[in-house]
Image: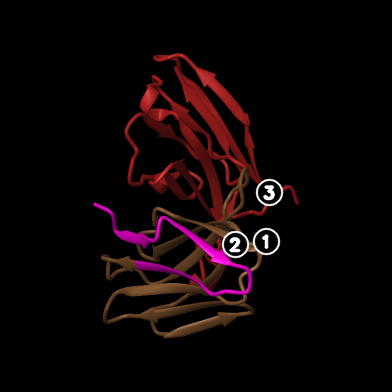
Chain colours: A brown, B red
Amino acid sequence: QQQVKQSPQSLIVQKGGISIINCAYENTAFDYFPWYQQFPGKGPALLIAIRPDVSEKKEGRFTISFNKSAKQFSLHIMDSQPGDSATYFCAGFNTGGFKTIFGAGTRLFVKA
Amino acid sequence: NAGVTQTPKFQVLKTGQSMTLQCAQDMNHEYMSWYRQDPGMGLRLIHYSVGAGITDQGEVPNGYNVSRSTTEDFPLRLLSAAPSQTSVYFCASSYSGLIEKHEQYFGPGTRLTVT
């Protein structure tokens, strides 16, 4: 049972374009939704996160859009750069259960 | 601060062997966890701990044991290695308090191959 479904598996975007990664969750007990970025050979690192009482959060070129009724959220990377090429994971966290459940990941490649 | 450290970086085991993956953090974090990363499967939670002496199972705990005798250390033990445990293992730590501070800091990973 995959509690967090992520798509697409891989994504190729031209430099300067918009990268969009989508996630859907099943567990309504999740109360925190982080996105992690992972470069090859490294551990993941927190990129941006949102709580379900907020519909959008923006940090620089990265924006999370959140739709609580549809149980969906997405990451938008504006003006995508080759340095953004990495694997991105969405996740849901349940404060009461102390568990973070990750999506399967999206490999992003930004062409120069 | 060294952050989260993991040893070894690489390990090859034969089926049936046991071993312990080490994880340590120097940030005084209460929460620590172990994940395995497999292609197309994302990061799956194996075990986690919310403080010294307290551990619990994650999504895929079978074949693994953990203990948390100190705040700093959270070793993962493979009891009898199987080829299905070939994976990259990540340890992570975070504050378990305010939700806005629940950023998990990941170690560099251990790549394990079981033949």
Tell me whether circle 1 and circle 3 mark residues in contact (CB < 8 Å). Answer: no
Residue at position x 42%, y 73% in the image: A74
Instruction: Give, as a three-letter code, the residue at label 3.
Output: Asp
Whichever of labels 2 and 1 marks the residue nearer the N terminus, that label is 1
Q: Residue B94 at x, y = what percent?
A: 56, 57
Q: Amino acid at mark 2?
A: Val
Do residues under tags 2 and 1 come within 8 Å of each other at their CB atoms?
Answer: yes
Nearer to us of marks 1 and 3 is 1
Alpha carbons under labels 3 and 2: distance apart: 35 Å
The residue wearing badge 2 is: A110
Reply yes or no: does residue A7 show up in magenta. Answer: yes
User: In the image, residue B10 lies at what x, y percent?
Assistant: 60, 27
Residue at numbered disc 3: B26
| Residue A56 shown left or right of residue A73 in the figure | right
Label 3 or label 2, whichever lies nearer to me, is 2
Point out the frontmost of discs 2 and 1. 2
The answer for how far apart the CA atoms under marks 1 and 3 are is: 30 Å
Image quarter in which the C terminus of chain B is found: top left
Disc 3 secondary structure class: loop
In the rendered image, residue B114 lying in the magenta stretch gets the answer no
The residues tagged by marks 2 and 1 sit, at their Cα atoms, a distance apart of: 8 Å
